[in-house]
Amino acid sequence: MKTLSRMIRGRCVPIGLCFALTIAPAYAADNQALVRVTLDEAIKMALAYNKSLLATRTSIEQSQHQETTAGLRPNPGLSASWSPLPLFKPDEGLGNYFKDSSGLDIGLSYTIERGGKRGERIRAAKDNTSVTRSQVSDNERTLIFQVTSGFINVQLAESTLELARDNLKSFQNAVDIGESKYKSGGISENDYLKIKLEMLEFETDYEQAQLDRAQNLSDLRQLLGYDSVPADYDVAGAFDYLALSVTLDKLQKLAEENRADLRAAIQSVTAAKSQLSLAESNGVQDLTVSADYVRSPLGGDKTANTAALGLSIPLAIFNRNQGEIARTRVAVKQAELQETSVFGQVMTDVRDAYEGLQRNERIAQHYRSGYLEVSRKSRDISEYAYKRGASSLFDFLDAERSYRATQIGYRQALAAYLLAVEQVRQAVGTRNIP
């Protein structure tokens, strides 16, 4: 997943200070047909159209079909035999031979499952479906975080692009003033060339910002479902500070209630116990009942018509399914250990996300507490003094660089904070944090 590192390569500066950086770039204002997607819409689209998620969801349907298989009863058996049959044509003819010398045996058999096997199979299959549903829900949780992260990266890229465009236009004015001063003898050729060289950085910033925006929109489109939005779509929403007041205890409680992977781990213990019960049931031997009709020749025109009933059951001397029973007992222990491990991981995720939120909020607040305004005033004063010959070129360029670094730093800090908010939501398993 691409992160803020892509934006660090660009060094851009705004011409004005805004704490709320609304994503409404001028380059899209003329296009009324442009598709704009909000964050909520992006999440809904990803859940509906992301092909990887849709493929994962088919595992639920597959598991449901396994429930059908588990509930099937054994098929009855049908057998028929006619013996003895002649290898060569008898002297009395085939018809007389079949009538006077051969017998017919027709039988039906059915296996009666003992030990509650069918019920245990159904219960085990249903428990496995429950685990599968929770695992799919956990994939949805991961996808939502990927979408929100991608959405924020697009917002950061577009804010930086708007920033780069304004800075390029603003510095072009400084270059024009420098050119006028140079022609009038107010500055040396060397100073004028330094200003022109500084222009290259602004142009590079703008080109890099355009690339970042295009790549982040492309990455987000893949998450939404490649065909769900056109190639020239855009995002809509405010790129702004969002206060989130939470406590660690509250977040951990929410995680216990909502984390799908923890729910899947708990259900896996139940499913493992169901497999153990099924293995024990499979150790009970099944009973096979049969009924036969026998027609036997007695010689001449006489035949005997008889019936036979039979019962058979394997003698559980060697194979009592003891190996599978022992294996599933160990599997239950394994599932319980995994549940404990997942619980610890969930609590760790919540704590890490909470600490990250606190740190990134402090950094964002540092910028908002006055540094942005200080950098803007410093730059404006230096620019004003330089245009009137009261300040050197080096002072002006230093103030310009400081302002650029501060402004881009704030945007990156804001994006990092918004990502930290989304990490908290992912860690607790829900976006609805009271």
Image (cartoon, rainbow, N blue to C red):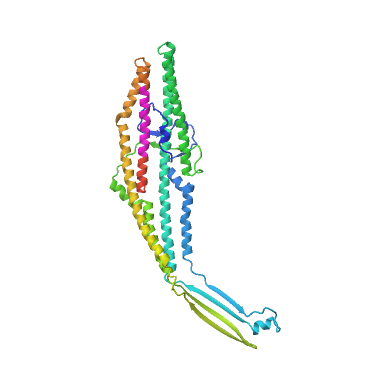
Instruction: Say whether residue 155 is magenta.
Output: no
Residue 433 visible to the viewer? no
Left of 306 or right of it: where is 113? left
- Above or below residue 263? Residue 180 is above
Residue at figure coordinates x 35%, y 23% from the top left: 379
Q: Where does the magenta region start and end?
A: 398-418
Where residue 123 appears, as percent x and y from the top left, is: 41, 64
Where residue 102 appears, as percent x and y from the top left, is: 63, 82
Where residue 109 appears, as percent x and y from the top left, is: 52, 75
Count of picture labels: 0
Left of 94 or right of it: where is 391? left
Q: Locate the N terminus by quadrant.
A: top left
Q: Quadrant of residue 326?
A: bottom left
Q: Main secondary structure of the magenta part?
A: helix
Q: Residue pushed farthest front?
A: 318
Residue at figure coordinates x 43%, y 14% from the top left: 189
Left of 320 or right of it: where is 257? left
Which of these two is toward me, 315 or 93?
A: 315
Residue at figure coordinates x 30%, y 29% from the top left: 370
Residue 6 visible to the viewer? yes
Q: Quadrant of residue 238?
A: top left
Which of these two is toward me, 398 or 137?
A: 398
- Above or below residue 138? Residue 165 is above
Residue at figure coordinates x 59%, y 86% from the top left: 304
Q: Quadrant of residue 85?
A: bottom right
Q: Residue pushed farthest top?
A: 185
Instruction: Say whether residue 407 is magenta.
Output: yes
Where residue 352 appears, as percent x and y from the top left, is: 33, 44
